[in-house]
């Protein structure tokens, strides 16, 4: 009986720690999403994936977390918040008509289909 109580207590602590870490991670990604820093895209960006989004766009918000966590592993995604006025110069340069849009070399996708996004980002 004592062993069951110890195991239950340990599991409860693990669940609380996981919940706190998950909440902190979620809050941090939301903070990153809202950043409106000016982005300077390198001229040789063939290995980079450009992710154009707006922090007030529901479609962008629906995929932002998945793309962010993929970038934690790959480190090849450039996040460009189009709500930053100085980033809007890329609208003409990359012929953007909607967000979210991902561009990788000659590949381009606008939308929220994660299967198509994974094709652009790579697995």
Image (cartoon, helix red, strand yellow):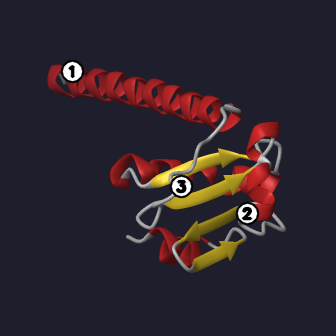
| Furthest residue toward left | 3
Observer-nearest of 80 and 13: 80
| Furthest residue toward front | 43
How many badges with numbers are in the image?
A: 3
Residue 60 percent location from the top left of the image: 73, 54
Residue 108 percent location from the top left of the image: 63, 76
User: Residue 90's image quarter?
Assistant: bottom right
* Crowding near the residue tagged with mark 2, few <14, some 14–19, many ≥20 C-alpha atoms within 10 Å: few
Residue 84 seen in the current view: no
Separation of residues labelled 3 and 2 (CA atoms): 23 Å
Residue 77 percent location from the top left of the image: 49, 54
In the image, what residue occupies the spot 74% across and 44% down? 87
Observer-nearest of 1 and 27: 27
> Where is mark 1, residue-wise?
6
* Mark 1 or 2, nearer chain start: 1
* Mark 3 or 2, nearer chain start: 3
Are dots 3 and 2 in contact, CB under 8 Å?
Answer: no
Separation of residues labelled 1 and 2 (CA atoms): 61 Å
> Where is mark 3, residue-wise?
67
Q: Determine whether the residue tagged by mark 2 lies in a helix, strand or loop.
A: helix
In the image, what residue occupies the spot 61% across and 57% down? 51
Separation of residues labelled 3 and 1 (CA atoms): 39 Å
Which of label 3 and label 2 is nearer to you? 2
User: Looking at the rendering, in which quadrant would you find the N terminus?
Assistant: top left
Residue 93 marker: 2
In the image, what residue occupies the spot 69% across and 68% down? 112
Are dots 1 and 2 in contact, CB under 8 Å?
Answer: no
Residue 78 percent location from the top left of the image: 53, 50
Task: Name the side, left or right, on which 40 lies relative to 1.
Answer: right
């Amino acid at each position: 009986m004592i062993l069951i109580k110890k195991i239950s207590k340990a599991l409860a602590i693990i669940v609380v720690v996981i919940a706190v870490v998950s909440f902190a991670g979620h809050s941090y990604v939301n903070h990153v999403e809202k950043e409106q820093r000016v982005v300077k895209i390198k001229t040789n960006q063939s290995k980079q994936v450009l992710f154009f989004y707006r922090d007030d766009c529901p479609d962008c918000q629906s995929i932002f977390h998945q793309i962010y966590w993929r970038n934690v592993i790959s480190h090849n995604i450039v996040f460009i918040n189009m709500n930053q006025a100085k980033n809007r110069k890329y609208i003409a340069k990359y012929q953007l008509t909607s967000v979210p849009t991902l561009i990788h070399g000659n590949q381009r996708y606008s939308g929220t289909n994660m299967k198509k996004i994974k094709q652009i980002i790579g697995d």
